Image: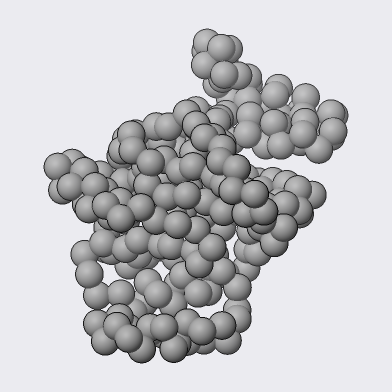
Amino acid sequence: DETKKVVAAYPSVNYIFQENKGLSSARNMGIKHAKGNYIFFLDSDDILFKDSIGLLLVEAENNPWADLTYGDANYFREKDGKQFNCRRKCFEGEILCDLLKNGNCIVVGTILIKANIFRNHFFDESLTRVEDLDLWLNLALAGCKFKHLNRTIAKIRLHSKNMTNDLIAQDKVYLHVLQRLSLKVENNRKIASASAIAIAKRMLVGRKYFAFFCNINSALFLYPGNWREVLL
């Protein structure tokens, strides 16, 4: 594309080129070259509102306990411009169990992250999709805290080349990420329960009913308290 030519007009922008090695690799390359206190990601097909980073920065500075600060996103269809306001249930603080029980509520193009978080964590370059949720889960597991800003930060473009269009591949990698996390939390009964529920939900989507009921039973065994807290 014409990225290099366009960026040449902005001397303050540090343009880094590498051969296509996937989304995670590109983001990790940017992380390694970043010099600021915060990191923000913007995919080439999405639109960031003019004041979005400033709003996130103010929210982050006002809540120094938060390691990651994220906002909301609207979606629009490229072919006709039709917009969709996909509101998601959002969470703050320690959100590992919330992410497991309710799914990914964080859009990559809406999150401001403290740069020091990436001393020990990066996007998994072996994943072809769901790499964002994988990172959020691992950061939450490591004790990082999240802050939600109730403002629309970006517009996400929906088109035929979106990786999320391949639902079968998406579901397969999603399940892999959850199963891999479950091995890390098997000694924490409550988190392991939430992980088992998350896996069960993905299996139910994939019509793997026997495995679904096995995971439900596992969740109830791991966390036999209030069954509503386990299932909802």
Quarter of the rendering occupied by the C terminus: top right
Q: In which quadrant of the rendered image does the N terminus lie?
A: bottom right
Q: Nearer the viewer, residue 169 or 180?
A: 169
User: Residue 118 at x, y = what percent?
Assistant: 35, 64
Residue at (63% x, 63% y) in the render: 127
Q: Quadrant of residue 186?
A: top right
In the rendered structure, the answer to whether residue 75 lies left or right of residue 11 reads right
Q: Is residue 172 visible?
A: no
Please say if 96 is above or below 227: below
User: Where residue 179 sits: x, y (%)?
Assistant: 65, 46
**Residue 207, above or below 82:** above
The answer to whether residue 55 of the structure is visible from this angle is yes
Extreme-front residue of the structure: 80
Residue 141 falls in image quadrant: top left
| Closest to the observer, 116 or 111 | 111
Q: Report which quarter residue 126 is drawn in.
A: bottom right
Q: Residue at x 77, y 31 (%)?
A: 204
Relative image position of residue 109 (x, y in whole percent): 44, 54
**131 and 107: which one is in front?**
107
What residue is at 53 percent from the left and 74 percent from the top? 25
| Horizontal relation, residue 54 to residue 107: left or right | left
Judging depth in this view, the residue of 31 and 198 nearest the camera is 31
Count of all numbered marks drawn on residues in the image: 0
Image spot of residue 184 (x, y percent): 53, 47
Judging from the image, the colouring scheme is: one colour
Q: Residue at x 22, y 69 (%)?
A: 36
